[in-house]
Image (cartoon, rainbow, N blue to C red):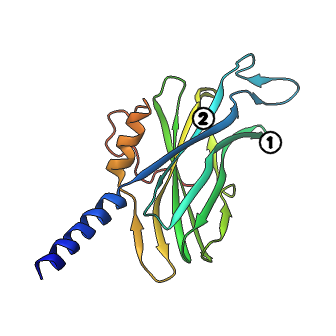
Amino acid sequence: MRRGIIAAVLMLIVAIARAAELKVDSVDGGSVITELSSGIKVNEGSSLHRTFVTINDISSPVQLQGSGIIVTFENSRYSFAGHGNASAAEALSAFEVRHVLFGMFGERIKTLSAEEVRDLEKASSFYLGHEEWNATEGQVSDLLTVVSFVASVRTASGRVWHCDLKKISEAIGQLNLSLGSESKALDAPSRP
């Protein structure tokens, strides 16, 4: 009996530790130069490249790959657009991805939120480029790093999963990026 209790406690400890395990990956997000028109470019002459950082909680039913935000300029307006893929570990009904944008010196610019409400089969993949947000020239010029993570998931069976924002915040801090003094910097803000 005692061994059974000890085994159950050990399994619980492993499950709790695993639930908070984060995997951090980064990819090149492309040049900071944004071409407008007629040869006019924002950040012309810069050799800097944006970095897309993905933070995946291994307990999440959705995992991100190569996620970030790209910059577009069309019809005389700047936009941020989602980029990358999400894959479903089980059948889903909805999920939310947040993108935290950071400037040239590691300061938070803003947080974008994208919700996808659609049925996705287990092991399916979904392109994240369907969302778009308005951007200013100042934000476009300053954007250097994008940190993306899955905030919430509703599975087809009705189970709701939420990320641990404290763990996400700690992971961002380890990247030498500043969320600033705003305590709700990772909360769901701007939606398209």
Taking 61 as reference, is 150 above or below it? above
- At x 40% / y 42%, what residue is drawn? 171
Which disc, if any, is residue 51?
2
Which residue is painted at 69% across and 58% down in the image?
130
For badge 1, the amino acid type reads: Asn
Quadrant in which residue 144 is drawn: top right
Q: Nearer the viewer, mark 2 or mark 1?
A: 2
The vertical placement of 34 against 4, above or below, is above
> Would you say residue 20 is visible in this rendering?
yes
Does dot 1 land on a helix, a strand or a loop? Answer: loop
Residue 58 picture location, percent across and down: 45, 59
Q: Which residue is mark 1?
A: 75
The x and y percentages for residue 5 are 15, 76
Please give the name of the residue rendered at 66% of the width and 52% of the height, measured from the top-left corner: 84
Residue 128 got which mark?
A: none
Q: In the rendered view, does 79 fall on the left or right side of 148?
A: right
Q: Earlier in the sequence, mark 2 or mark 1?
A: 2
Seen in the image, is 28 located left or right of residue 17?
A: right
Q: Which residue extends farthest top? A: 45
Q: Quadrant of residue 138?
A: top right
Name the amino acid, label 2: Thr
Cα distance between the residues tagged 2 and 1: 26 Å
The residue tagged with tag 2: helix, strand or loop? Answer: strand
Q: Nearer the viewer, residue 187 or 86?
A: 86
Crowd band around label 2 with a 10 angstrom C-alpha radius: few (<14), some (14–19), many (20+): many
Residue 140 in view of the camera: no
Looking at the image, residue 131 lies above or below residue 10: above
* Quarter of the rendering occupied by the C terminus: bottom right
Of 71 and 86, the residue lying toward us: 86
Q: Residue at x 80, y 42 (%)?
A: 75
